[in-house]
């Protein structure tokens, strides 16, 4: 399997570039229709409020954030937590990384503007930042009117808190991926898990989620959307044709083998082709390929984003005319 990335450069007339850019974009690269959308995003730093509270403040906090204080726990539990050494250390590190939340708030506002552009009936949630004891499997929770973000999951891949976590997981524990994680959480509210058990159906499911990010995070790079390093993305792009050939030659697109998900879809240090080059590859290459098929479908068909989400994997695949990049 080759690992050389061939890059093609196309040149366009300068006038065409100038006209097409300024006719639909403002100076930030965001479309005028999106930039005109007005939202009032509420961001509450519960992590900061709780860490800086005194025991007598607990009743007021419980009143303001009842969903964060399970009723089965008495106030003594929360008072003890205020004085817990580990909790203080977690907050200290979070506060050092997120002394303010200005950039993240702006990024989230832009993300939700794009959501409202494509899904005008969506209700923008209230954002609550918390400390989750590095619960990285639930770093973002979107539930109805609330978006909970565990900031201690975004301290950087080399942070000492993540020393016991697998490297491929820790690689995503960086604030660079915070909005991408929010977009994934949003995608799960709009996508249904496929009833079709084929590998193709699962690929396209993740392809839809990643294509949503193309539209809702247009200023982000592809590596940021799929949580790859630049080198991992380059490997996937350089080997797209060989990956596709592997899937076709082994007739796995319509396979219902349960082991295909851990090999090519689930988070993992690398994808498992069962070849010598496995260690060179990034994980989740099935998701990457589903993304490229979905992109091809949308490029070749006049379909709205909201319509795409309800289409079957089979229809998307057949009408995509997908051809891997060489």
Image (cartoon, rainbow, N blue to C red):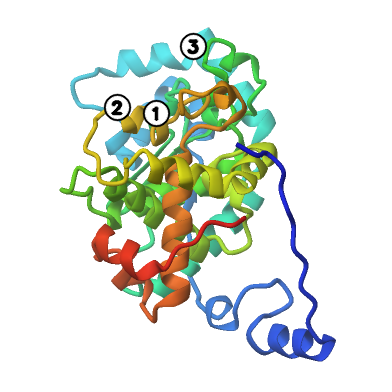
For the residue pair 85 and 236, the one nearer the viewer reads as 236
Which residue in the protein does label 2 denote? 259
Which residue in the protein does label 1 denote? 263
* Secondary structure under the numbered disc 1 in the rendered image: helix
The quarter holding residue 9 reads bottom right
Image side of residue 326 versus residue 28, left or right: left
- Asked if the residue at tag 1 contacts the one at tag 2, i.e. Cβ–Cβ closer than 8 Å, the answer is yes
Instruction: Look at the image and tell me whether residue 57 can be seen.
Output: no
Where does residue 53 sit, x and y in percent of width and height? Answer: 49, 27
Please name the residue shown 37% across and 71% down the image: 305
Which residue in the protein does label 3 denote? 83
Residue 7, above or below 56: below
Where does residue 319 sit, x and y in percent of width and height? Answer: 34, 70
Q: Distance between the residues labelled 3 and 2?
A: 46 Å
* Sequence-wise first label, 3 or 2: 3
Image side of residue 67 versus residue 294, left or right: left
Where does residue 198 sit, x and y in percent of width and height? Answer: 23, 44
Residue 211, above or below 74: below
Tell me, for residue 199, which label it has, or none.
none
For the residue pair 155 and 221, the one nearer the viewer reads as 221
* Sequence-wise first label, 1 or 3: 3
């Amino acid at each position: 399997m080759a690992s050389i990335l061939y890059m093609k450069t196309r040149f366009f007339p300068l006038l065409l570039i100038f006209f097409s850019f300024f006719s639909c974009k403002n100076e930030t690269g965001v479309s005028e229709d999106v930039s005109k959308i007005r939202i009032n995003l509420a961001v509450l730093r519960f992590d900061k409020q709780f860490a800086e509270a005194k025991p007598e403040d607990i009743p007021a906090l419980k009143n303001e954030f009842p969903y964060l204080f399970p009723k089965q726990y008495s106030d003594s539990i929360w008072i003890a937590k205020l004085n817990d050494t580990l909790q203080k250390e977690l907050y200290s590190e979070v506060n050092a990384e997120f002394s303010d939340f200005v950039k993240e708030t702006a990024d989230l506002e832009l993300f939700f503007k794009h959501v409202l552009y494509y899904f005008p009936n969506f209700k923008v949630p209230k954002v609550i930042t918390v400390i989750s004891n590095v619960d990285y499997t639930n770093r973002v929770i979107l539930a109805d009117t609330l978006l909970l973000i565990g900031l201690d999951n975004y301290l950087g891949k080399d942070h000492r808190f993540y020393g016991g976590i697998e490297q491929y997981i820790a690689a995503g524990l960086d604030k660079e991926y915070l909005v991408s994680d929010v977009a994934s959480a949003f995608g799960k509210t709009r996508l249904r898990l496929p009833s079709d058990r084929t590998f193709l159906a699962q690929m396209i499911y993740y392809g839809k989620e990643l294509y949503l990010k193309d539209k809702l995070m247009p200023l982000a790079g592809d590596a940021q959307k799929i949580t790859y390093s630049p080198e991992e993305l380059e490997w996937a792009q350089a080997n797209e044709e060989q990956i596709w050939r592997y899937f076709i030659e082994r007739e796995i697109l319509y396979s219902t083998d349960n082991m295909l998900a851990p090999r090519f879809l689930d988070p993992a240090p690398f994808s498992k082709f069962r070849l010598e080059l496995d260690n060179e590859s990034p994980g989740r290459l099935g998701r990457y390929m589903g993304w490229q098929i979905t992109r091809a479908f949308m490029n070749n068909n006049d379909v709205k984003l909201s319509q795409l989400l309800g289409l079957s994997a089979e229809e998307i695949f057949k009408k995509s005319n997908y051809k891997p990049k060489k």
